[in-house]
Image (cartoon, rainbow, N blue to C red):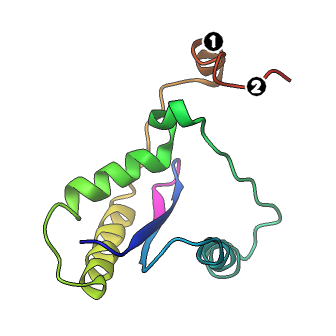
Amino acid sequence: MSGWSSFLEVEPLTGRRHVEARERRTRQDWARWIRSMLTERYPQAERLEIHYTPKHGNWLNIAEIELSALGGQCLNRWMPDLATVRHQMRAWEQHRNNREVTVDWQFTTRDARIKLKTLYPKI
């Protein structure tokens, strides 16, 4: 499977997520993803906050946890084309959302500030 990229959004406390496979990952693709998120899935949102994780702290990223589950539970086999990948991703997303699989985040902000203080800029 090559020639496609995935986009993912996660609500860690409610157990909702949305995932999509696209042919590429350009700035325009990302902008379309954000626009569809705000107009289709979260039209009531008043504000958008995007949080980037440090390059050396990717294991902290909740999206990485979900992408790992997606890879192990859905994308762990050969699929002939992008349409099949999209179909399988929708089924995985629906199953996880129906089960309301939340992220049990044990790492507190205080712990992160102590353990990862060298990775974050000083304010």
Residue ID at (32%, 73%): 89
Where's the N terminus, which quadrant? bottom left
> Which percent across, then down, holds residue 26?
58, 72
In magenta, the rendered stretch is 13-17
Disc assigned to residue 121 = 2
- Place residue 119 in its image quadrant: top right
Percent position of residue 56, x then y: 52, 30
**In the rendered image, the vertical position of residue 108 relative to residue 34, given as above or below:** above
Judged by depth in the image, the label closer to the viewer, 2 or 1, is 2
* Residue name at image x 39 percent, y 45 percent: 65
| Residue ID at (22%, 53%) | 72
Vertical comparison of 12 with 78: above or below: above
Q: Residues within 10 Å of mark 1 (few under 14, many from 20)?
A: few
- Where, quadrant-wise, is the C terminus in this rendering? top right
Task: Provide the major secondary structure of the magenta segment.
Answer: loop
Disc 2 element: loop
Residue 26 shows which numbered tag? none
Q: Amino acid at mark 2?
A: Pro
Callout 2 crowding tier (Cα within 10 Å): few <14, some 14–19, many ≥20: few
Q: How many marks?
A: 2
Q: Specify whether 20 is left or right of 114.
A: left
Inspect the image, locate mark 1, and give the three-letter code of the amino acid beneath it.
Ile
- Asked whether 90 or 95 is in front, the reply is 90
Instruction: Give x and y (percent) for residue 50.
Output: 70, 53
Counting residues from the start of the chain, the first of labels 2 and 1 encountered is 1
Q: Which residue is mark 1?
A: 114
Q: Hey, which residue is sitting farthest bottom in the picture? A: 83
Tags 2 and 1 in contact by the CB under 8 Å rule? no
Seen from the viewer's position, the closer of residues 93 and 121 is: 121
Q: Verify whether residue 16 appears in magenta.
A: yes
> On screen, 68 above or below 18?
above
